Amino acid sequence: SVKPSHYRRLVVLGAPRVGKTAVIRRFLGDDGFEEHYEPTTEDFHSKLFHIRGERYQLDILDASKERDFAAKRRLTILTGDIFLLVFSVTDRESFTEVCSLREEIVTAKSKLTKSKENRQIPIIICGNKTDLNSSRAVRHSDISRFLGEDRVSFEVSAKDRTNLEEMFEALAVLGGLPTETR
Ligand code: GDP
């Protein structure tokens, strides 16, 4: 097992079919990309890192696939250290969903810390499927308009790998984990 300070829990949230599974698979180093949509119940993964002789563990929970997620979501949110909110740039509603999830996380977490000052919660907004540019329904400017300037956001494609490494790196940095490059 790893030291508590070397452990993080990443909670992935977003509407169905936006590509959460595909993004998580890429993060886990899986080279395969599934064209076929198969809803899975498998929702929990662990990634181990060895960086400069130290062991780190990142547990990844695809919370949308949790049974009874609605009932458990507050607890899931409270126990999360880092959040990845995924939408599809081709699906306007999935973007709206991300906006309300972000609100929910900020509200839950700030109640917990009981602090007025907005301690920055590590949240990354991920707009997936940029390869489907011709059916784009969410513009880049929408993201800053609806989520404000403090957001950390990436537009990616799990299919052709655009911007994924950059996003995973930011995720580690924001979550206070070391990366190979620093
Ligand atoms: P989830 O329900 O959010 O976990 O979504 P999945 O990862 O299962 O993906 C849903 C569907 O979208 C599948 O058919 C995937 O092949 C497809 N998909 C996922 N990511 C991308 C992407 O970046 N580009 C394209 N074109 N399709 C994607």
Image (cartoon, helix red, strand yellow):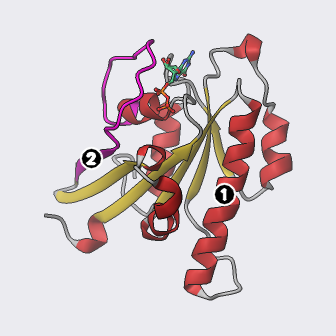
Q: Is residue 174 visible?
A: no
Q: Residues within 10 Å of mark 2 (few under 14, many from 20)?
A: few
Of the two numbered discs 1 and 2 on the same chain, state the one appearing first in sequence.
Answer: 2
- Residue drawn at point x = 59 percent, y = 38 percent: 15
Residue 152 drawn above or below residue 16: below
To which quarter of the image does residue 94 belong?
top right
Q: Look at discs 1 and 2 and give the one toward the viewer.
A: 1
x and y, in percent, of residue 105 in the image: 61, 64
x and y, in percent, of residue 113 in the image: 56, 84
x and y, in percent, of residue 13 in the image: 53, 47
How far apart marks 1 and 2 lie (CA) works out to: 24 Å
Q: For this view, does 146 lie left or right of residue 31?
A: right
- Residue drawn at point x = 64 percent, y = 55 percent: 101
- Residue drawn at point x = 55 percent, y = 34 percent: 16
Magenta span contains residue 29: yes
Q: For this view, does 150 lie left or right of residue 4?
A: right
**Quick one: 163 or 8, which is closer to the camera?**
8
Q: For this view, does 165 lie left or right of residue 119?
A: left
Magenta span contains residue 130: no
Q: Main secondary structure of the magenta part?
A: loop
- Residue drawn at point x = 42 percent, y = 55 percent: 10
Amino acid type, mark 1: Arg
User: Tags 1 and 2 in contact by the CB under 8 Å rule?
Assistant: no
Q: Secondary structure at mark 2?
A: strand
Amino acid type, mark 2: Lys
Residue 144 drawn above or below residue 178: above
Residue pointed to by mark 2: 47
Residue pointed to by mark 1: 102
- Read off the magenta span: 26-50
Image quadrant holding the N terminus, namely bottom left
Residue 95 drawn above or below residue 174: above
